[in-house]
Image: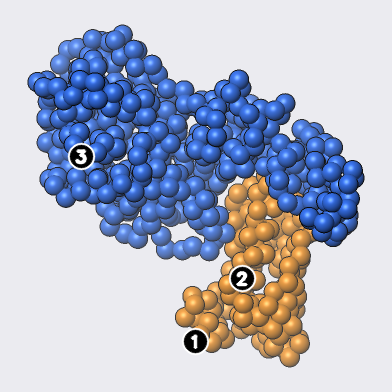
């Protein structure tokens, strides 16, 4: 089962659409609720990151009987220092974004904590690719 | 389905001989538990939550509430009626509280008690429960049984957030049973009856959740009792009422508002929301499940629009009822006459076991088969017209696709595709050419 979504930078009202659809699909399949929760937390964070930082992006989710593999590819400024971005509390978000309740700087570490496999690859000036795998058992 | 689970007890039943198979009910069911088969609406018993949405839209009153016959009260020597404040608020002002009570005594009840007497002690109990709650918040109120069942089936991961305190109705029932027992009355002589504004409360009394057994012996349909009282009033006028024990029917301003929107949320000292009507409740729970909502401590969720004022068995307009209750509340004291006695007697009764989740299996218990079926259903959906006309007997094209992959229906059920084959020009004139191109 493959799902795919387009995201527009700055469109906070639509942020959460992908994680909501993936959640619904996993729930209909009967995936364990605690696993779904991890998927939703990780994907929602990653989705909001694209909305908050990139110009546009795509999300794909590949569901197989034992796991879900999610890939977020964005066109945007990229991350110059990934190690720094992975530090809890570190944030580059603007004041405007923070006022909306986003950009507290817990995004990447939170995704990483909920994922079984987490990959991030970024080219400054071009964009970022995030891969999240969560096992069902 | 978990084979060890007992099937739900249902308080709603479709009268086959009356049902015209019009499909209105199947479209409003929040768990998609209804289909039209052989010209009649058919209920999937594992999925029904007794919310009564189908009852509200049925044009021929084919859906009935399985209540108890009022004559059943005469099996008991002591016939106690637990009355919600909404019952009184249905009547226009000229039919006073005393007049209504007089008529009820004439009908054979020996004691009239206000249901919401059990609410007052919950004020402290709920606040304490939420403060001490160690799981993830918000805590969800256990008050509305249709919401409890909705959560069991559609939001099973929230079952452990349902407050493990019994609702006011059960607290009051326990109190009076205890009173009679204490006074040496044999319990087989005591019949406790409840006047219900909805079907879900009947189901909850006959088959409670959380390892609880209700002491209530029978449930009386509020709309039937309304008719009986009103008829007696029209025929005999107001009778002198000598028996009334004021103390048992006394009520506080908090209690009288308990079944209204905000009845619980307003007494909560943290951050609480009051949400009424099934679509609103579902929308909120979806957002909560989506991790989009943070920082709420307590949720008062009620299945009916305007909470119990909009119950399917309540007469008169729900907004007028709310107005009457608000007016009653203004004149009532902060505490009812038995407040302390309730606190002394009932605190031990209030806790209940956790509510058990009962997730609906949509495709198959085996994830591999479920995934295959889901993929097949998505493929089928691309071939279906996506107009949710329900002419196939399922509530939506999506539901038909699911039924097909679970071998409950076939593609032949789609009436629109038949019609298109028979007369493509006409169908395309209405629905457009694009709709019939297979993706």
The colour one sees for chain B in the rendered image is: blue
Local secondary structure at mark 1: helix
Q: Chain of mark 1?
A: A
**Of A28 and B28, the residue lying toward us:** B28
For mark 1, what is the residue?
Answer: A95
Q: CA distance from mark 2 to mark 1?
A: 18 Å
Q: Nearer the viewer, mark 3 or mark 1?
A: 3
The image quadrant of residue B321 is top left
Residue visible at 65% across and 71% down in the picture: A47
Q: Tell me the tag on residue B93.
A: 3
**Of B251 and B347, the residue lying toward us:** B251
For mark 2, what is the residue?
Answer: A15
Position of residue B39 in the picture relative to residue B409 (left or right): left
Mark yes or no: residue B162 visible: no
Position of residue A97 in the picture relative to residue A24 (left or right): left
Q: Position of residue A100 (x, y in %)?
A: 49, 77
Relative vertical location of residue B244 with respect to residue B367 in this rendering, above or below: above
Relative vertical location of residue B297 with respect to residue B90 in this rendering, above or below: below
Identify the chain drawn in orange.
Answer: A
């Amino acid at each position: 089962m493959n799902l795919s979504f387009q995201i527009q930078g700055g469109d906070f009202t639509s942020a959460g659409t992908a994680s909501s659809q993936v959640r619904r699909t996993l729930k209909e399949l009967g995936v364990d609720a605690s696993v779904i929760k991890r998927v939703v937390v990780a994907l929602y964070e990653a989705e909001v990151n694209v909305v908050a930082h990139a110009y546009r992006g795509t999300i794909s989710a590949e569901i197989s009987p034992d796991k879900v593999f999610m890939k977020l590819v964005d066109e945007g400024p990229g991350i110059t220092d990934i190690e720094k971005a992975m530090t809890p509390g570190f944030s580059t978000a603007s004041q405007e974004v923070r006022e909306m309740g986003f950009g507290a700087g817990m995004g990447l570490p939170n995704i990483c904590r909920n994922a079984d496999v987490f990959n991030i690859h970024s080219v400054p000036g071009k964009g970022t690719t995030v891969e999240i795998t969560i096992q069902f058992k | 389905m978990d084979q060890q689970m007992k099937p739900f007890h249902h308080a709603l039943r479709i009268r086959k001989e009356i049902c015209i198979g019009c499909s209105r009910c199947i479209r409003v069911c929040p768990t998609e538990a209804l289909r039209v088969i052989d010209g009649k609406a058919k209920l999937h018993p594992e999925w029904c939550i007794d919310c009564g949405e189908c009852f509200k839209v049925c044009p021929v009153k084919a859906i009935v509430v399985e209540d108890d016959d009022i004559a059943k009260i005469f099996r008991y020597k002591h016939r106690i009626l637990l009355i919600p404040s909404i019952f009184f608020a249905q009547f226009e002002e000229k039919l006073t509280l005393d007049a209504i009570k007089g008529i009820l005594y004439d009908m054979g009840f020996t004691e009239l008690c206000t249901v919401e007497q059990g609410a007052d002690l919950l004020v402290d109990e709920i606040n304490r429960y939420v403060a001490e709650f160690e799981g993830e918040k918000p805590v969800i109120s256990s008050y509305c049984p249709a919401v409890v069942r909705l959560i069991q089936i559609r939001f099973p991961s929230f079952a452990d957030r349902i407050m493990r305190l019994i609702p006011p109705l059960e607290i009051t029932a326990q109190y009076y049973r205890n009173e009679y027992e204490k006074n040496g009355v044999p319990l087989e002589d005591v019949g406790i009856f409840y006047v219900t504004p909805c079907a879900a409360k009947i189901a909850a009394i006959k088959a409670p959740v959380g390892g609880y057994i209700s002491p209530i012996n029978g449930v009386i349909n509020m709309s039937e009792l309304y008719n009986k009282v009103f008829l007696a009033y029209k025929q005999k006028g107001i009778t002198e009422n000598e028996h009334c024990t004021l103390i048992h029917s006394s009520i506080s301003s908090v209690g009288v508002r308990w079944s209204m929107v905000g009845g619980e949320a307003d007494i909560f000292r943290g951050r609480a929301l009051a949400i009424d009507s099934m679509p609103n409740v579902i929308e909120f729970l979806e957002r909560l499940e989506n991790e989009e909502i943070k920082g709420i401590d307590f949720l008062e969720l009620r299945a009916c629009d305007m909470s119990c004022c909009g119950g399917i068995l309540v007469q008169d307009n729900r907004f007028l009822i709310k107005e009457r209750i608000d007016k009653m509340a203004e004149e009532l004291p902060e505490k009812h006459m038995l407040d302390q006695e309730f606190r002394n007697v009932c605190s031990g009764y209030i806790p209940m076991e956790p509510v058990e989740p009962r997730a609906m299996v949509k495709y198959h218990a085996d994830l591999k088969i479920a995934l295959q079926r889901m993929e097949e259903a998505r493929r089928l959906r691309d071939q279906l017209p996506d107009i949710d006309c329900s002419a196939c007997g399922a509530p939506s094209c999506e539901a038909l696709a699911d039924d097909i992959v679970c071998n409950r229906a076939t593609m032949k059920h789609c009436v629109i595709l038949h019609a298109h084959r028979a007369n493509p020009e006409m169908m395309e004139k209405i629905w457009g050419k694009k709709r019939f191109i297979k993706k």
